[in-house]
Image (cartoon, grey):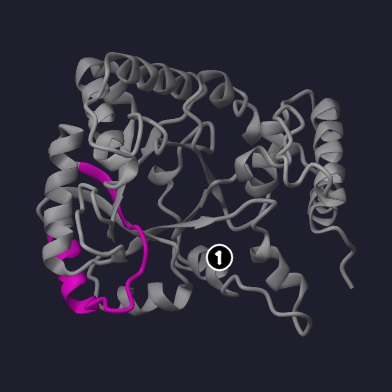
Amino acid sequence: MAAVDESLDPDPSGLIHGSMGLGGGWDDSPLEPSQVEAAEAALDAASGIGISWIDTADIYCNGKSERVLGEVLQNRPDLRRHFSIQTKFGIRVPGNTTASDVAHYRQDADTVLASVEGCLARLRTDHLDALLIHRPSPLIDRAGTARALDRLIDEGTVGRIGVSNMSHHQMAALQAHLNHPLQVNQLQLSLAHRDFVEVEVGVNADPAVFPAGTLEYALAHGVQNQAWSPLAGGRYDPDQPADTGRQEDPAVLATRTEVARQARAGGVTPTAILLAWLMRHPSGIVPVIGSSRPQRIMAAADAARAARAMSDEDWWKLFLTARGGAVR
């Protein structure tokens, strides 16, 4: 089994700060001082609980997520020294920094190199600690993409490469052309998006959507599994307002009650319990928490401790209440 690169682990929190919400709206409006202040407050909160990785993407807030991060990190050398930066490319949408006539995914060699040039300029840096392909394109020229990614690592522009929203089959097909290893796969994983568990408990039963074997492939090949939207928008957090469309869902209500019980028993926040459920999984899942509110970020402070303390029975209780039924 390949060893996971420990330098990727956001020690000691076990978390990554997702910066999709920083920078204001998804439009062409200029950055405002209040948005820069909000970004700085979010990064201060994240660093305060031990988070040392920032995740962003070239399309977030029409490029303003990267821009506001670049401004804050330039103004605060202490934060720049503290944080490693991970960004993503490959989604092209009309009216964005990746302007296109039609929304699509693209990662040919020219797009790779041009995207990185734009990311570096917006982030005001000469180096990216990690670069991920945001979404897989069915038209990908794997050999050409691999040459561009290898070049970026060889010249020192990018530290590590990875993917997002890919199956293990797609990863293996790309890896066959690379000289350097893929080290990250970022997937939507949470109690709401729990197909990664359903495919394990549901063998020879109803098929699930999640590509079986993807987390196991990552574990065997030293790829860090990252979870985007790990809190499912607060769906199961009793400290957050219930979604109007789901507040009568018995499974959601039961899960919020169970999360509250475990939080009280462990002396932690419901946020910590929800993140701990992912982190307790043996595939080494690292949640990317996307809140821009300092209080919400700080609520995740005890997630790693909660994961270490979570029993098998409590983990199963959360899974079974969320799915609304027992396993066979």
Q: Which residue: 11% across, 48% down? A: 117
Q: What residue range appears in magenta?
A: 128-151
Q: Is residue 42 above or below residue 65?
A: above
Q: Is residue 51 left or right of residue 56?
A: right
Q: How many marks?
A: 1
Locate residue 46 relative to residue 205 in the image: left or right. left
According to the picture, the residue beneath numbered tag 1 turns out to be 215
Q: How many other residues sit within 10 Å of disc 1, few (<14), some (14-19) or many (≥20)?
A: many
State the residue in front, 200 or 89.
Answer: 89
Residue 235: give x, y in percent of width and height: 69, 42
The local secondary structure at tag 1 comes to helix
Q: Is residue 99 magenta?
A: no
Choose between 311 and 130: the one closer to the eye: 130
Where residue 196 appears, as percent x and y from the top left, is: 64, 65
Q: Position of residue 138 (x, y in %)?
A: 33, 78
Which of the 4 image quarters holds residue 295?
top right
**Residue 130 on the magenta segment:** yes
Quadrant for residue 29, please give it.
Answer: top left
Amino acid type of the residue tagged 1 in the rendering: Leu
The residue that appears at 18% across and 36% down in the rendered structure is 122
Name the quarter where the C terminus is drawn.
Answer: bottom right
